[in-house]
Image: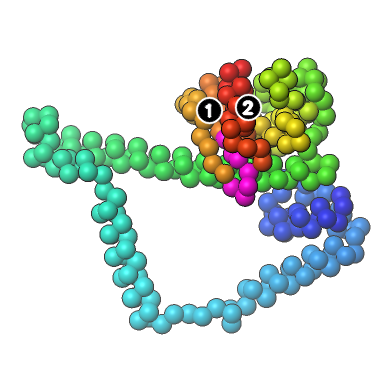
Amino acid sequence: MKCDDSRIYLSAYLDDELDVAESLRVQKHLVECRECREAQDQQLALRSALRDPELYAHPSADLSKRLQASLRRAAKEEAQSRRPAWTDWLRVGSLRGYFGWVPAAAALVIVTTAGALFLMNGMRSSHDQVIASAVLAGHIRSLQAGHLMDVPSSDRHTVKPWFQGKLDFSPPVPDLSEMGWTLIGGRLDYVDGRPVAALIYQRRMHNINVFVWPNHDSADSTIKEEDAQGYQILHWNGTEMTYWVVSDLNREELLDLARALRGH
């Protein structure tokens, strides 16, 4: 490991955010490099200084009460403004107008079920944000020298077997060269606490990471899009696999790749 790589990973190393292999690489480099050990000591000293209780100002009891009251009012106003219009007819009287007489218990079941569905959707969205951050970090990390590929090859029959014994699934590795997408290799990566396959395709000088792992949710072939830090991030849930695609390639071309992968 070079000093530049060590400095990039140092904060994650101190926060215990690296996998075992990367953590051991950083640790080995720190043993061998005096300058990087000094950088580590500086970060540890800064963290210790930031824990000094004298740096923190404690609000008065009166200010705390006023802040809490203000937050409660804001939360109540936001909840009222976001309440779906259809909740108005969930009153028993309105339910009679839609379905005839509905017992109060039935209305409670409807409201509870709807609330659970909204909660699940919110959790799913939040979880997607966590995954998006992880795959973006994996993509950026892969752009460091020597990190892009574990198995450099344009032959899918070389890349696909390489994952055997390293993953508990066999990732699809389609050959899309006739469509202008060149497979250049593969890599073992980690997302959301589990090992995943990272397939690397190339279009002109743009590297594209395609993260693949088994889909344990319902299938949804709709390609969802977002961008962060100048990178495009696409993902969808296939029947068997979940796909996340990350690159600095333009949106239109990256969508073409996603549709090609989805069709295989």
Please rate how many residues cluster around mark 1, counting C-alpha atoms within 10 Å: few if below 14, some from 14 to 19, many from 20.
many
Q: What residue do we see at 76% from left, 43% from top?
A: 143
Quarter location, residue 10? bottom right
Up-down relation of residue 42 to residue 233 (above or below): below
Residue 21 in picture, x, y percent from top left:
78, 44
Q: Report the front residue among 4 and 190.
A: 4
Mark seen at residue 75: none
Kind of element beneath mark 1: strand
On-image quarter of the C terminus = top right
Q: Position of residue 206 (x, y in %)?
A: 73, 36
Q: Secondary structure at mark 2?
A: helix
The one of 202 and 134 positioned closer to us in this rendering = 202
Q: Residue, x 69% and y 34% (percent of image)? A: 208
Disc 2 and disc 1 in contact, CB within 8 angstroms: no
Q: Is residue 185 left or right of residue 260?
A: right
Disc on the earlier residue, 2 or 1: 1
Identified by mark 2, the residue type is Leu
Please tell me which residue is depicted at 53% across the width and 45% down the height of the picture.
129
Where is residue 174? Give x, y as percent. 69, 19
Name the residue beneath numbered marker 1: 237
- Mark 2 sits on what residue? 257
> Total label count?
2
Is residue 110 among the parts visible in the rendering?
yes
Which dot, 2 or 1, sits closer to the camera? 2
Main secondary structure found in the magenta portion: strand
Q: Which span is picked out in magenta? A: 228-234
Q: Mark 1: which amino acid?
A: Asn
**Looking at the image, residue 77 lies above or below residue 198:** below
